[in-house]
Image (cartoon, rainbow, N blue to C red):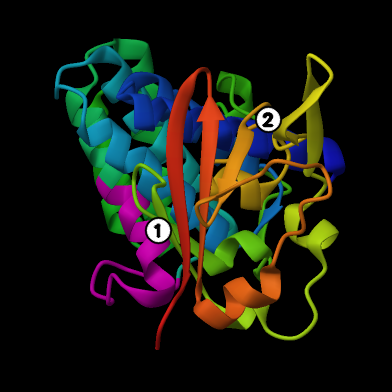
Amino acid sequence: MHDALVAALKRLRTVAEKSATAGFADLAARAWAAEAELLEAGPHSDHERTAVWDNLRSELAKLPAEHRLRRRLAVDLAVFEAAHARHATPAGSCPASTDKFGACEAVHRAIDDLTLALRDESDAEARAWLTEQLAQAHEQAGDVAAAIAVRKATGHPPDSRTPAERGYLEFGRGEVVPHVAGPADLVRCTYDHSRCEVDPIGVSGDIDPSGLLEGAWFMPRIKGGQFNGFVVMNARNSDVMRRIDLRTRDRILAVDGVPVVAPEFAWDLSGALNRGRLALTIERDGVTLEREFVLRRP
């Protein structure tokens, strides 16, 4: 992906996760939807796509059923699903009688969600467009009879405008590519990030701290002429830092309970690996937080 696109995706993910943690499901859903649309407009892995779609569905489920944003973003997700099916499912390969899982899951999920979106839509113009999108999804699956029935039931001329002509991004360049696992994929954290498990395979052999932190670093903080801990810097574009919720300007106060009292403090990574545990005490906006990292056991 282009560097600017990668940066945009990371920022949207950060907004989504912070909003979800703070309890703002509407803001989180907006951010996940924006990320889903960006992904579908270019090369992306199924790993990335399914994670974003699952998070979007999770946040939408927290909103009341009649919430306008929930209904709007549900339509958007159905459109993304249909766009994905067009480049992920061979045309005509998944008629209604086929298994709705595996290679056919994408197009059948698009059909189901477009059907729900159409059922809940009251605007005549929007209904006409969704009807045509649903008919095209049936055609993509290979169910021509269903496509004809959908168009016949509407009673109005079809609205054959493309998603791009309706204000969405251009999805013609969307394609599924192999997932390349990064350091952040090896970390799983609790919802509040107080405890994170690290896959041992990610810390075996020689460790490259700069590669692991993806540009983030720790700057000694001097206050009143005295050393005052390490401050996290440039964390915004690091997937690892985002996953473990270390943010720019967080101050490291202690490591494994030992106060960080001098800029010469050495991180004992070998000792942490041998123990299978590392604990950080940090300060964020005047609040002290504890973070624990443990090696995941088989």
Residue under pointer 1: 107
- In the image, residue 271 sits, relative to residue 29, either above or below, namely below
Query: Could you tell whether 7 is left or right of 149 in the image?
Result: right
The magenta region covers 93-112
Query: Could you tell whether 230 is left or right of 282 in the image?
Result: right
Report the mark closest to the observer, 2 or 1.
2
Residue closer to the observer: 298 or 96: 298
Count of number-bearing discs = 2
Quarter of image, res 186: bottom right
Q: Residues within 10 Å of mark 2 (few under 14, many from 20)?
A: some
Q: Position of residue 184 (x, y in %)?
A: 61, 59
How far is mark 2 from mark 1, CA to CA?
41 Å
Q: Is residue 160 visible?
A: no
Query: Could you tell whether 82 is left or right of 119 in the image?
Result: right
Query: Could you tell whether 268 is left or right of 143 in the image?
Result: right
Q: Give me the residue at 35% from left, 52% from top.
A: 190
Q: Is residue 183 visible?
A: yes
Q: Give me the residue at 65% from left, 30% from top.
A: 169
Q: Amino acid at mark 2?
A: Thr
Secondary structure beneath dot 2 equals loop
Quarter of image, res 274: bottom right
Given contact means CB atoms under 8 Å apart, are the residues at marks 2 and 1 in contact? no
Q: Position of residue 226 (x, y in %)?
A: 79, 24
Q: Position of residue 132 (x, y in %)?
A: 40, 34
Which mark is on residue 248? 2
Residue closer to the observer: 2 or 182: 182
- Magenta stretch: includes residue 286: no
Q: Give me the residue at 67% from left, 51% from top.
A: 174
Residue closer to the observer: 228 or 269: 228
Q: Position of residue 291 (x, y in %)?
A: 46, 49
Q: Residues within 10 Å of mark 1 (few under 14, many from 20)?
A: many
Of label 2 and label 1, which has the lower sequence position?
Answer: 1
